[in-house]
Image (cartoon, rainbow, N blue to C red):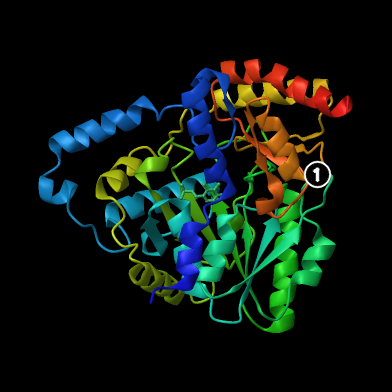
Amino acid sequence: MISEKMLELGKKSSVIREIFEYGRVRKAEIGAENVFDFSLGNPSVPAPQKVTEVMNRLIAETPAEILHGYTSGPGDIKVRTAIAEYIKSRFNVNADAGLIYMTCGAAASLTVTLNAITEAGDEVIAFAPFFPEYRVFVEQAGAKFVPVSCKTEDLQIDFELLEKSITPSTKAVIINSPNNPSGVIVPESDIIKLAKLLEDKQNEYGKEIFLISDEPYRELVFTGEKVAYIPAYYDNSFVCYSYSKALSLPGERIGYIFVSPTMKECRDVFAAVCGSGRALGYVCAPSLMQYTVAECLDDTADVSVYEENRRILYDGLTDIGYTVIKPDGAFYMFVKSLDESAYKFYERAKKFELLLVPSDDFGCPGFVRIAYCVDTDLIKRSLSAFKELYEDYKNE
Ligand code: PLP
């Protein structure tokens, strides 16, 4: 009577959501300040004041039929032009408004892109650890999800394994740098290597392999490390951008897809993106938010708080004795589980009111993810709980 597949998806919430809900109940029981909730990647710093000012002015001054009206399906042309100009000047690549599609955040950008390019039998590669929704998005598009593990010591691309995983059915590779859940940034040298490998494979198989750059965390970089702009290195590339984290606007659902003009038959690919947006119901992204971001392209939320949190947490955890993959960006930290089962470790951490996410759903067992987009004070206070947890293991 109804779709079994959708029923299953709807009933089975993600582990992250489950932990978040547990946290909600626990906070009501013992007080929010006593629960060290590191479960969710919800930005903890407010959107820049400029965003509020621009929104207020737009609301006050824009005629209602424009402010609340539909834009054209792919988005308002002035907004798309502003974004294309911004991409050109910031990244020194070619771009034009006719290849920008406004969407509801990176999630919609990914589903629209994947549905535009894949057909039954296609395979889509993602590097593990990965954002768990990738599997849902890829499978919903009718393709096969192919996770490829990163090197365990630094969670960077394992090129040997990647090469073995690319087949004549590979349609796309998703890259996410800075990464959720690890915070790792892929160095430019690896991007060059990746582009070369994909080009070689395209030539070998005589077909396109797309590179999809999922970049909600592009602006969250703490080390001065260069985050390579994929279209500058690889022709058949898409950028799925989002303002959720850059401007701290996850609830406003705004982002875009950029189809690189260097892509073969890019106009047809863009038409397929429009068709996919239409089929999925992702047309006319929220008007007010389109107009707002167009005026805030060079702005970000104050991400220095995340940098401070990262420093305190990394130093604190490594001092205690934990093994931590040092994150260069985003607001996540990947910590080696003290238990063989990350799930058991997560359960034991709960006894100390620490809510950590076991890494199994990220396709990389043996770790927990800490989302440190929380109050700095909570981070400082959590360190004694982490110490007790550590000693609990050492004393058993
Ligand atoms: N991709 C990654 C890696 C994410 O971490 C997230 C959200 O946390 C998304 C995509 C979806 O972001 P958005 O809120 O822009 O839809």
Image quarter of residue 218: top right
Against 353, is 91 above or below?
A: below
Question: Which corner quadrant holds the C terminus?
Answer: top right
Against 71, is 172 above or below?
A: below
**Residue at the spot x=38%, y=56% of the render?**
103
Tell which of 360 and 49 is nearer to you.
Answer: 360
**Residue at the spot x=57%, y=40% of the render?**
19
Q: Is residue 18 visible?
A: yes
Residue 125 in the figure: left or right of residue 395: left
Residue 87 in the figure: left or right of residue 220: left
Ligand 1 within 8 A of label 1's CB? no
Q: Residue furthest bottom?
A: 206
Residue 202 in the figure: left or right of residue 63: right
Tell which of 278 and 389 is nearer to you.
Answer: 389
Tell which of 122 and 362 is nearer to you.
Answer: 362
Image quarter of residue 146: bottom right
Q: Amino acid at mark 1?
A: Asp
Residue 77 in the figure: left or right of residue 130: left
Q: Position of residue 381 (x, y in %)?
A: 64, 15
Q: Is residue 327 visible?
A: no
Identify the residue under disc 1. 154
**Residue at the spot x=53%, y=57% of the render?**
12
Tell me the element at label 1. loop
**Residue at the spot x=50%, y=39% of the render?**
21
Q: How many marks?
A: 1
Q: Position of residue 52 (x, y in %)?
A: 30, 30
Image quarter of residue 377: top right
Against 396, is 345 above or below?
A: below
Q: Residue furthest right?
A: 395
Q: Position of residue 256 (x, y in %)?
A: 42, 54
